[in-house]
Image: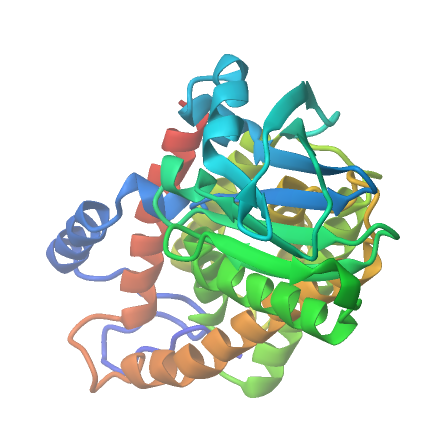
Amino acid sequence: MAAITPTDRGSRRRGRLVRPAPRACLALGFLLLAATPPAFAHDPGLSSLDVRVARDHIGVVLALAVADVDLVGGRDTLRALALESIEVRIDDRPLRGVVETVSGDGGNAVQVRLTYLGAAGSRLAVRSTVANRLARGHRELASIRAVDGRIVSERLLDANWAELDASVEEATNDAVGRFGRFLSLGVVHILTGYDHLLFLAALLVVVRRWRDVFQTITAFTVAHSITLALATTGVVHAPVRLVEALIAASIVYVGLENLVRSVPSSRWKVTFAFGLIHGLGFASALRDLGIGTSGAAVALPLAAFNAGVEVGQTAVAAAFVPLFWKLSSPRSAPIQFASAWSLLVVIAGGYWLIERIV
């Protein structure tokens, strides 16, 4: 199957992409670069807040990614930040908190452990304004666990919704609800992961059959599922900066391949290879939440998060592939759409690559 088949008399042989008009592509390139702020290259951030109820006190563990720690001034500021940002109340009575330790988890997160004395009561309320102090769009997975470790309440907090509460006496382990929350987190992560989406779009823009679309997505899914599981469980460790740079490099590579080579109908091998790298990027979201390092169960959040990623990317593919096909029609535009799109992909990927290396 050819990637793009020009129909005019000056067309090249079948299976070869035609270079777009230089002026048009250059203009499109500058437009994309101008519209691509640095925030698009990064996830807005994830943290976790694990609240455990004991007989005479309440233990709280705040886990932040190293990058977010740097944003607030380093580890020296974490004690004050945690005490100022986290409020624990029993029956509307605020408890006094003490920072016990500030330490790394052996990975890419820093943990602050606090103790709040006086756990007698029936209604526990926890308020966290950590998200207000970090990048816009930051989210925090907050969990309250009963004395026996069961989940009492769990919610994604942000700048607009900063509180959750629970009745320890009525504690239940709502596995269905927890699966749904991590499923939602996976969908949100892929839809806001512009680098992952651009990589997938660069692959699909030259595809002309649904069978090849399915093969491409399947190869990407299998690959990133492998490294997502290995990295989340701690079997594989990779520096975050290196992973982010390699993800940007994968975008540049696919865009250039679209422009300078005869692109086969299906590129499952290169998709699988780069999918392994993207899986390490997905894993950072769960690692930032403490999944795999805090002693909590891994299987359910891992499966739910991965399913959410698949739902998100499948929805995007289903929406954009027909649009790509329409725009690639010779009557839809004066230049070859796939070539112009691939040039924009190279520009965006190159921008992110330089930013992440520097």
Q: Quadrant of the C terminus?
A: top left
196 to 210, vertically: above or below = above
**Residue 178 on image: x %, y %:** 70, 67
- Residue sitting farthest toward the right: 148
**Residue 337 on image: x %, y %:** 28, 71
Is 236 in front, or is 353?
Answer: 236
Query: Is 298 situated left or right of 268 in this image?
Result: right
**Residue 281 on image: x %, y %:** 60, 46
200 to 357, vertically: above or below = below
Q: Residue at x 31, y 78 (%)?
A: 6
191 to 73, vertically: above or below = below
- Residue 220 visible? The answer is no
Query: In terms of image quadrants, where is residue 349?
Result: top left
Is 286 in front, or is 115?
Answer: 115
Query: Is 50 situated left or right of 316 in this image?
Result: right
**Residue 71 on image: x %, y %:** 41, 26
- Residue 179 visible? The answer is yes
Q: Residue at x 49, y 41 (%)?
A: 249
Q: Residue at x 71, y 29 (%)?
A: 107
